Image (cartoon, rainbow, N blue to C red):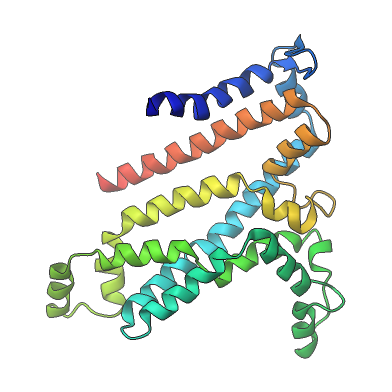
Amino acid sequence: LPMAFTAWLKYYPILSAFFISLFKYDPINPPGKFVGLSNYIGMFKMQYYWDAWKNTFIFLLLQLAMCFFIPLIQALFLNELIRLQKCLTTLYILPALIPTSVNVIIWKWIWHPDYGVANQIIKFFGGQPQAWLSDPGLVKFCIIFPGVLGGGLTVLLYLSAIQGVSSDIMESAALDGCTGFSKIFRIILPNISFMIFIQLIMCVITTMQLLDAPYMYASGGPSGASTTQGIFIYNAFNQDLNYGRGSAASIVLLFVIAGLTMLQMHFEKSEKE
């Protein structure tokens, strides 16, 4: 029974999306006219589609560079504490409880070009105010930057993995004089590599599907600078009412994410061997 529900709720929608992508879908008289791969071919000819791919990969690089390692550093720091560990762990988790919409409202106020805190800080140090969310060159940075300040649940997962390292190994390392950064790079990180690998996969998957934050910050703008594949698919369905194109983009995104995940798993397997 669980397998049947998994197939129905997970794989049936995928097959349905592929089926719809082969038609000029008519929701009133489904499935409409069969067009084969025309939706894919037409989509591949759209510059807007390739710009969305470019933005998606830039978001991925920014996410990995700015936010992926921060929770790990926070967890390593918390692991060294004794008295305030539980208190600080709670403080790291609390921001994750704030709804994304509320978080976006706060940060849109911070990035506001006229009275936002960001420009006030820049003015204080003698810099020039920026347009932030209205600047195509800065909007991606503004969307990803809030993740730098908190690791949320990821911190707790890393901390649990670190504390799960055998005490015998840690004691043996201490007796051999392996302390400080040497302990981190030679003992802790190799023993929690499985958790780092899992979080890397999840980071890639979630960023490649990024939709809510760019849409709430700038609706994909300015000039399409924050339009991701998620927003492209959303617009295809809800603005263009082109269900065939939206389904085609979804299938391509599925295969790209699957390919990246398998590539990561291949490298992880090669390193273990």
**Left or right side of 220 for 10:** left
Residues 146 and 272: in front is 146
Residue 226 position, x and y percent, is 74, 52
**Picture quadrant of residue 267:** top left
> Furthest residue to the front?
1
Query: How many numbered tags mark residues here?
Result: 0
Residue drawn where x is 54% and y is 23% of the image: 12
Q: Is residue 166 above or below residue 242?
A: below
**Picture quadrant of residue 140:** bottom right
> Furthest residue to the top?
34
Residue 108 position, x and y percent, is 76, 67
Quadrant, the N terminus: top left
Residue 25 position, x and y percent, is 76, 18
**Left or right side of 178 for 144:** right
Q: Is residue 93 above or below residue 229?
A: below
Q: Is residue 227 above or below residue 82?
A: above
Residue drawn where x is 50% and y is 61% of the image: 68
Residues 257 and 244: in front is 244
Residue drawn where x is 65% and y is 47% of the image: 56
Residue drawn where x is 79% and y is 63% of the image: 133
Quadrant, the C terminus: top left
